[in-house]
Image (cartoon, rainbow, N blue to C red):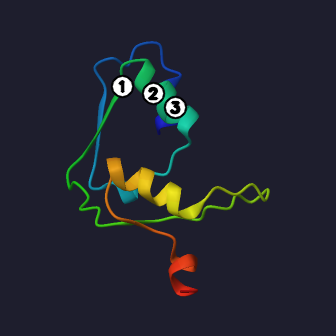
Amino acid sequence: MLEYLRVQPEIKDVCLVVKDFTKIFVSPIVLGGFMLKGGRLMVVKRPNLLAISINPVSPSGFAVESERLCHALQEVVVPVFDVLAKASL
């Protein structure tokens, strides 16, 4: 639906409301295009984010220091855990 809406000539007054964020499956390009044209997306139930788990190794093999990444994210979000690093302690 967002793909269709983002290519419409006038969507600045369109507001799409979904039950919760788990109902939204969209690429950053499509969502960004929709929002750049003035479309709005709202959720009825706000998430209660308790923690984040990370994988400091990308699929291509690039890695960042796990503790540094966790600490940086915790400063701006919620507790962050590298599950594999914690399991190996």
Q: Residue at 26% of width from left, 58% of height from top? A: 47
Q: Which mark is residue 34?
A: 2
Instruction: Specify few, some or many for label 2: CA neighbours under 10 Å numbering under 14, 14-19, or 20 or more.
Output: many
* Earlier-in-chain disc, 2 versus 1: 2
**Secondary structure beneath disc 2?**
helix
Q: Amino acid at mark 3?
A: Tyr
Give coordinates of residue 40: x percent, y percent.
32, 30
Q: Secondary structure at mark 1?
A: loop
Percent x, y for residue 16? 31, 37
C-beta proximity under 8 Å, tags 2 and 1: yes
For label 3, the residue is 4
Q: Mark 1 or mark 3: which is in front?
A: 1
Q: Earlier in the sequence, mark 1 or mark 3?
A: 3
Cα distance in 3D space between marks 2 and 1:
5 Å
Q: Residue at 61% across / 61% down in the picture?
A: 56
Amino acid type at image mark 1: Gly
Near-viewer residue (44 or 64): 64
* Residue in view at x 54 percent, y 34 percent: 30
Q: Is residue 73 left or right of residue 62?
A: left
**Residue that mark 1 sits on:** 39
